[in-house]
């Protein structure tokens, strides 16, 4: 398996060569040259496999330059009952016949991002050990990505994490998740400023190509192909758990931001998983809902991006969306390049009057959006009706999923975080605090380890350089 760029300007590369990178050298995103597929007979064999076995069957197709035994070892270290609270890793909860929630949030930071990032941590460590290289991961977070990335990389050889967050702007719970880590390879940096200042620092450092090369700067952002590959697994797991035979189709509802999670569903479908619809849910930041309703993709300016009660979906543009458009065009890199020429300049594109728009429905994608009132109502309804508590992101997914539900087609809603991370909305909906999973009872009172810095890219560079010198 080799990887190419959505913009056509990268010589094909093996998995290990794209693993640590961000954007391809031409500004595009890495994609497998072709999607591997499962025949009906092969699909039948996958039913009944454990999570780790399934992970191996899928990942070995994408990471075929990692020897099988090594890959098995990496998977066995990653998907443990200890890290994810059950052997099933992503258990299916049934609300009523034909309506399910796929639990993706039982990893160390209680958000679905752990499923991909825990694997990424072990893959990075493995590949770096082979090459003798090291990596300084620089990131900015306003909530879920930071904790997931730190828990994935803590204690890993040859990896340091420098995570910028806006001082005092995250929830106490999320702050405590990150700042309570005492591992010497994790650097929490509270920036005197807002999230955009943090992101600007990451951009400034990444744009300094000399510094980037000299200090081996990397990222763990959602355009990383290995993250998508890891997320494909649970679509298969959820499908098998919700059906009895591979003659059945299911639909998935996916709370979406950067189009990473649902992109994995799209790939699973391209590989032959019988998915009827992929139901994309946004919050008030409805860039993607607008596209799937009208054909127009119009990324928003930062000032136009709203702060909502499902904050991990507060995006102004959807970085992985380019992967879907690549497939929509029949993998026509020249067209993708042309469309993103305007996007990269802050513009938009409109496919409504083109033959491509007709094709969108062949991919099973439909959409809808939620808002604060709908989230609160959904949390309350699901709690009263089924005795299950969901977080605000999952609530966006459930709300839109139910709007598209079809008789006779099981609906699987993906749970992307646990309610404990968003207690304010939970209290608003049901009148009391969400329960805390074991081990998180006193997280806010643990000792914290972090630095405070001004919003100054040079100061952050100096810190990275100083650590590299040790
Ligand atoms: C990251 C995140 C999302 C959005 O996922 P994408 O892959 O960016 O579409 C949704 N919900 C939660 C809780 C998240 O952390």
Image (cartoon, helix red, strand yellow):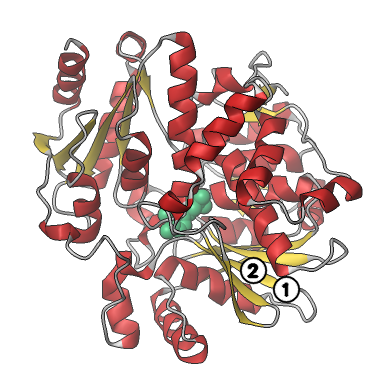
Q: Of all residues shown, which one is farthest toward the bottom?
A: 384
Q: Residue at x 19, y 29 (%)?
A: 184
Res 401 label: none
Name the residue carrying label 1: 410
Q: Is residue 279 visible?
A: yes
Q: Crowdedness of circle 1 by 10 Å Cα count: few (<14), some, many (20+)?
A: many
Q: Is the distance from the Cβ of mark 2 to the nearest ligand 1 atom less than 8 Å?
A: no
Residue 160 position (above or below residue 141): above
Q: Are the residues flagged by discs 2 and 1 in contact, CB closer than 8 Å?
A: yes
Of the pair 425 and 60, the residue shown nearer to us: 60
**What is the quadrant of residue 238 in the picture?**
bottom right
**What is the quadrant of residue 439 in the picture?**
bottom left
Left or right: residue 198 compared with residue 20: left
Name the residue carrying label 2: 412
Left or right: residue 98 compared with residue 175: right
Of the pair 138 and 322, the residue shown nearer to us: 138
Label 1's element? loop
């Amino acid at each position: 398996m080799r990887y190419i760029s959505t913009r056509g300007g990268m010589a094909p590369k093996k998995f290990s060569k794209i693993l640590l990178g961000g954007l391809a050298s031409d500004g595009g995103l890495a994609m497998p040259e072709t999607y591997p597929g499962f025949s009906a007979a092969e699909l039948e064999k996958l039913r009944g496999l454990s999570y780790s076995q399934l992970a191996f069957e899928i990942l070995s197709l994408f990471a075929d330059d990692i020897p099988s035994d090594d890959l098995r070892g990496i998977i066995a270290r990653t998907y443990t009952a200890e890290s994810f609270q059950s052997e099933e890793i992503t258990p299916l909860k049934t609300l009523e016949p034909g309506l399910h929630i796929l639990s993706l949030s039982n990893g160390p930071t209680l958000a679905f991002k752990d499923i991909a990032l825990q694997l990424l941590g072990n893959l990075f460590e493995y590949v770096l050990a082979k090459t003798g290289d090291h990596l300084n991961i620089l990131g900015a977070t306003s909530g879920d990505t930071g904790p997931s990335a730190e828990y994935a990389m803590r204690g890993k050889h040859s990896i340091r994490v420098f995570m910028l967050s806006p001082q005092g702007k995250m929830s106490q719970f999320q702050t405590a998740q990150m700042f309570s880590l005492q591992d010497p390879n994790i650097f929490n940096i509270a920036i005197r400023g807002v999230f955009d200042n943090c992101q600007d620092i990451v951009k400034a450092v990444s744009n300094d190509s000399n510094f980037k090369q000299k200090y081996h700067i990397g990222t763990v952002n959602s355009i990383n192909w290995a993250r998508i590959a890891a997320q494909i697994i649970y679509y298969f797991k959820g499908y098998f758990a919700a059906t009895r035979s591979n003659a059945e189709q299911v639909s998935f509802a996916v709370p979406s931001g950067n189009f990473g999670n649902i992109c994995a569903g799209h790939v699973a479908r391209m590989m032959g998983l019988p998915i009827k619809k992929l139901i994309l849910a946004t919050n008030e930041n409805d860039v993607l809902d607008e596209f799937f309703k009208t054909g127009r993709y119009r990324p928003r300016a930062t000032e136009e991006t709203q702060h909502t009660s499902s904050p991990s979906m507060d995006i102004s543009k959807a970085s992985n969306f380019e992967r879907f458009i690549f497939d929509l065009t029949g993998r026509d890199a020249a067209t993708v390049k042309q469309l993103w020429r305007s996007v990269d300049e802050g513009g938009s594109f409109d496919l409504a009057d083109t033959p491509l728009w007709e094709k969108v429905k062949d991919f099973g994608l439909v959409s809808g959006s939620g808002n604060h009132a709908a989230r609160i109502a959904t949390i309350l309804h699901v709690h009263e009706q089924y005795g299950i508590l969901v977080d605000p992101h999952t609530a966006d997914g459930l709300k839109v999923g139910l709007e598209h539900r079809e008789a006779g087609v099981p609906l699987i809603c993906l749970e992307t975080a646990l309610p404990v991370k968003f207690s304010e909305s939970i209290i608003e909906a049901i009148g009391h605090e969400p329960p805390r999973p074991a081990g998180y009872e006193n997280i806010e009172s643990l000792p914290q380890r972090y630095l405070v810095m001004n919003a100054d890219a040079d100061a952050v560079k100096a810190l990275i350089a100083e650590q590299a010198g040790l």
